[in-house]
């Protein structure tokens, strides 16, 4: 079994879409052909939570589970599979190849594309989640960005134990294991894999690579404080 298999990042027992993951293959492969095949085989394209006229549906097949809350001004473009009890808030843009489990949140002015949210994953405040996987009960701090494309446009790779790992993907953001938390304005560069329970301080920029379970990533910076009236008197 690869050290990057889904079982090392997630608890899949209660996740309705566990078939997306092959335990013998790296977890990021779920975002490629596996996701396309899963969506192609889905036969429950129905909306079980009524959508108001002010929710903008731009086309593509939709499955919206029961007891969801889709607020006015949300923009949806399929294919989307949204589980029971999810919340998509005003101004959110959820566009194509997105699978969400139960009780997930996409917040106001957040954008999500080609992503898998396990149960209880939250991207609640002005987040970008591109080509990424969020584990159970992950919470992204306000302004957290999961960048998914290298500036040079090449395949996303990362180093692990002095080996260069090729993902085979030109677009790949991040994998966040169960219970990860990011501080406000955290930026994850393409190819970040965070084990369960990792935490980042606000303003952290993570380089591509694997962060073991329970890692705390801090930002160290110096600050200078000046009393305002003395500054104005100069």
Image (cartoon, grey):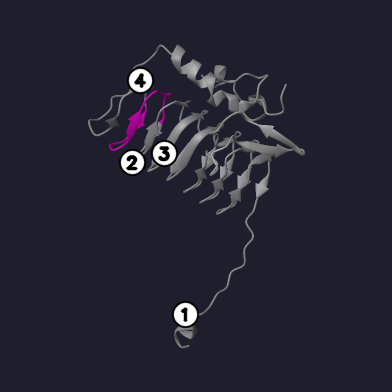
Q: Is residue 8 visible?
A: yes
Instruction: Identify the secondary structure beneath mark 3.
Output: strand
Q: Nearer the viewer, residue 166 or 12?
A: 166
Q: Which residue is mark 4?
A: 61
Q: Give x and y (percent) for residue 213.
A: 69, 38
User: Real-space Cα distance between discs 1 and 2?
Assistant: 38 Å
* 18 or 206: nearer the viewer: 206
* Neighbourhood count class around disc 4 (C-alpha, 10 Å): few under 14, some 14–19, many 20 upward: some
Spatial CA distance of label 4 from label 1 is 57 Å
Precedes in sequence: disc 2 or disc 3: 2
**In which quadrant of the rendered view does residue 212 lie?**
top right
Between discs 1 and 3, the one toward the N terminus: 3
Mark 3 lies on residue: 111
Q: Which mark is residue 179?
A: none
CA gap, disc 3 and disc 4: 18 Å
Residue highlighted by disc 2? 91
Q: Is residue 194 visible?
A: no
Of labels 1 and 2, earlier in sequence is: 2
Q: Quadrant of the N terminus?
A: top right
Instruction: Name the one closer to the observer, 8 or 3.
Output: 3
**Of discs 4 and 1, which sits in the foreground?**
4
Of label 4 and label 1, which has the lower sequence position? 4
The residue at which mark 1 appears reads as 228
Quarter occupied by residue 181 = top right
Where are the magenta residues, as a range? 68-86
Alpha carbon distance from label 4 to label 2? 20 Å
Q: Residue at x 59, y 69 (%)?
A: 223
């Amino acid at each position: 079994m690869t050290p990057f298999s889904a079982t090392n990042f997630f608890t899949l027992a209660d996740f309705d879409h566990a078939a997306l993951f092959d335990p013998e293959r790296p977890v990021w492969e779920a975002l490629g052909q596996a996701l396309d095949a899963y969506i192609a085989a889905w036969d429950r394209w129905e909306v079980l939570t009524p959508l108001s006229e002010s929710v903008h549906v731009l086309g593509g097949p939709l499955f919206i589970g029961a007891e969801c809350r889709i607020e006015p001004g949300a923009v949806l473009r399929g294919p989307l599979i949204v589980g029971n009890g999810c919340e998509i808030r005003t101004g959110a843009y959820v566009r194509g190849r997105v699978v969400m489990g139960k009780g997930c949140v996409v917040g106001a002015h957040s954008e999500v594309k080609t992503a898998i949210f396990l149960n209880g994953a939250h991207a609640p405040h002005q987040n970008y989640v591109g080509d990424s996987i969020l584990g159970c009960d992950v919470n992204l701090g306000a302004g957290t960005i999961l960048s998914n494309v290298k500036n040079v446009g090449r395949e996303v790779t990362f180093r692990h134990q002095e080996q260069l790992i090729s993902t085979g993907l030109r677009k790949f953001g991040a994998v966040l294991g169960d219970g990860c938390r990011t501080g406000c304005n955290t930026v994850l560069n393409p190819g970040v894999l965070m084990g369960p329970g990792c935490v980042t301080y606000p303003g952290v920029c993570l380089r591509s690579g694997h962060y073991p379970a329970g890692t705390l990533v801090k930002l160290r910076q110096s600050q200078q404080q000046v009393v305002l009236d003395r500054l104005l008197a100069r």
